[in-house]
Every structure is written in structure tokens, then in C-alpha cells.
Image (cartoon, rainbow, N blue to C red):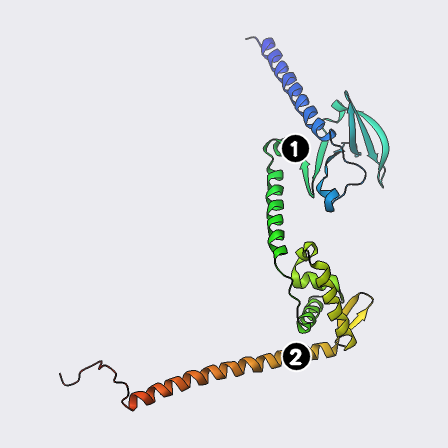
Amino acid sequence: MSIYEYDHANKLAVIHKAMISSIIKRALLGIALRRPSPNRIPRSGDEGAAVNCYTTRVSTGAGKELIVCSANGNSLECLEYDGDRYSIHATHDFESLIENKFEFTHYHGLYTTTYFGWWDFAVGTVFRAPYIKAWIYSTHSKISQTIYNRKKLITKQRIDILKTVLEAELNGREEISSLDIMTLMYDIRWYLHPSRDDQHHRIELYLDALAETEHLNKSQIHYKITGHGIAAIESYEEEERKHFESISTQRKMLWLTIVIAALTIVQAGLIKLPPILELGK
């Protein structure tokens, strides 16, 4: 093969490679543009769970930030960033943008996956790893919530509520609401529990009662522990300590009584113990 033929073959290979790359990138861009994201994307509730859309961003070498909205043949309809928001309508040639930095953000259900570049987007689209992880997490969350919903939300004693408020303040929170207290005592999943409203109402009644007895200070919807509240906790813990010490002492006395009774029976000859060693042999 002559040098001319070799160079010609290399040029053809480069052209074919560029054509294949362009075809693949057009196909990937088509996937994203089939479901363009709206101006407002719900990220919670039933509306958020039904979301399935993409946002395609492009960072050009000239320092422009674009969002690709649609494609019409070789033309891409975009919105350019004006320093505050994406508001400037612009049309760009696909080939002029293809080598710039593309970023694809997929909003699927309540989850968000961002792909940085064409290769990342292709791998995620083909092998589905982000979506498998989201499905596993979603399934685990649903099962955990179902199990949690079967449990009864047991109403805490007033002293437990005071302890929760005190612990929150010790961790840096200046004040706390009834919703915060519910979350700290029952986990964030209480929001989806079928008896959440009844239990929240009970906790609010306890909080208001503690505010009336000056164990808590109430400011609109927030609560803060008082000196009376701290003293009540200390008094309760002291009573608990004495109670446990009393139980421990009673158990020790019981075992001591059993041992003394056993020794008395043995000494009285009512029970003959088998000899362990026969002395004299």
C-alpha cells in the first residue's frame, strides 16, 4: 500500500468514526429530548412520583450556558442563560455543539440522576444501573414503611417528651415544634402512618399541658424547656435510680436468704450431701 493510499484509508476511518459518533450522539440526545422537562418539576407526592423527564445542559467553549429544548433536523432550539435565568431563545447547529460539554439530568419518579457527558449517559441508559439502584431503594422504603405502619404509635409519657426537647436543645436547637418532636420520637416515617393525625394531636395536648405547668415555654408553635422541666427530669431520673437500686437490693437479699436457708437445712441433717472425698482411704 502506497503512502497516499494509507493516508486516504486513515482519513476514511476518521470520517467513519466521526459519523458513527455523531449518529450515536444524535440518538442519545433524541432520548432526552423526547421527554423535555417542564418549567416546574414536582419532586414530592403523587405528582413527583409520576415525573419522567430530562434537562439537557450544554456548556460551550465561549462560556455560554444553554438548555436544549428541542431538535429540528440539524438545528437545536435552546435557552441561553442571561445571568439570572435561562430566558434567551437561541438556535444552534448540532454539529457546532456536539463537542461541547453536555450534561443530562433525568428526573425519574422522586429520584434524580445526572450524567456528565455522552459516555456517562450512554452507559447509564444501556446498563440501567442508576434505575436499578433507585428501584431497590424505593422497594426497600415501601416495605419498611408498610412494616412501620403496622406498628402502633405508642403515646410517650410526659417525661419522655421533656427529655426529647432537652436533648434537641443540647444538640444545638434553640426551639422545637410538635412536628419536630414527633419525628425525633417516632422517626420520619410517622408522616405516612395511618394514625399520624391522632398521635400528633395527643402529643400537642401533652405539650400544651407541660407549658401550662411551666415545664415548657411555648412561643407560637415552638417549645423550649424551662428550669422546672429540667428539674422534673432530674427528679424522675433520681427516683428511677433509687427504684433500680431497691430492686437490685431486694434480689440480692432474696439470693442471700436462699443460700442461708440451704445451709441451715444441710447443717440440720435434713439433706445429706454425697461425699466428694472419702478421707482415710
- Residue 91 in percent (x, y) is at 83, 26
Which label belongs to residue 250?
none
Residue closest to the eye, 53 or 64:
53
Local secondary structure at mark 2: helix
In the picture, the quarter occupied by the C terminus is bottom left
Residue 199: name its quadrant: bottom right
Residue closest to the eye, 143 or 129:
143
- Residue 44: tell me if it is visible: no
- Residue 228 in percent (x, y) is at 73, 79
At horizontal 63% and vertical 15% (from top left) the residue drawn is: 11
Which label belongs to residue 234?
2
The relative height of residue 9 versus residue 213 in the rendered view (above or below) is above
Q: Is residue 200 left or right of residue 123?
A: right
Q: Earlier in the sequence, mark 1 or mark 2?
A: 1
In the picture, the quarter occupied by the N terminus is top right
Q: Label 1 crowding class (10 Å Cα cut-off): few <14, some 14-19, many 20+?
A: many
Residue 222: name its quadrant: bottom right
User: Of the residues shown, which amino acid type is indicated by label 2?
Assistant: Glu
At horizontal 69% and vertical 80% (from top left) the residue drawn is: 231
Q: CA distance from mark 1 to mark 2?
A: 59 Å
Q: Which residue is mark 1?
A: 121
Q: Label 2 crowding class (10 Å Cα cut-off): few <14, some 14-19, many 20+?
A: few
The relative height of residue 42 versus residue 168 in the rendered view (above or below) is above
